[in-house]
Image (tube, rainbow, N blue to C red):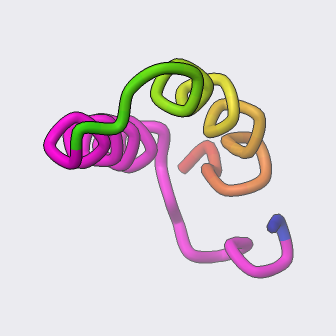
Amino acid sequence: MKPIHEGLGISDSDWDVFVTHAIATLDKLGVQGKEREAFPTAAASLKDDIAENV
């Protein structure tokens, strides 16, 4: 993940917008249970490889 996103300037603020939209999409699609609950943790595990401190 890191090499693909490196240099794109994805900020913590950008990351927060992504997570907010992704969760809203899961909710709109009716994703519930373990899949819905697991998303924030799974996404957070990728943040350091995607977001940069810009």
Which secondary structure is most common in the magenta stretch?
helix
The quadrant the N terminus occupies is bottom right
Q: Is residue 49 above or below residue 20?
A: below
Query: Viewed as shown, does residue 16 lie left or right of 51?
Result: left
Residue 36 horizontal side relative to residue 45, left or right: left
- Please say if 50 is above or below 40: below
Rendered position, 16 above or below 1: above
Give the side of residue 6 with respect to residue 15, left or right.
Answer: right
Relative image position of residue 27 (x, y in whole percent): 22, 34
The number of discs equals 0
Q: Which residue is most to the left?
A: 28
Q: Residue at x 45, y 44 (%)?
A: 15
Q: Residue at x 61, y 50 (%)?
A: 51
Does 15 appear in magenta?
A: yes
Q: Give how far across and how far down residue 33 sits, in percent.
A: 47, 20
In which quarter of the view is residue 35 placed?
A: top right
Who's the residue at 35% across and 37% down the image?
31
Q: Quadrant of residue 48?
A: top right
Residue at the limit of the structure toward the bottom, as seen here = 4
Residues 10 and 24: in front is: 24
Indicate whether residue 39 is drawn in magenta: no
Residue 3 image offset from top left, x and y in percent: 85, 77
Q: Which residues are magenta?
A: 3-29
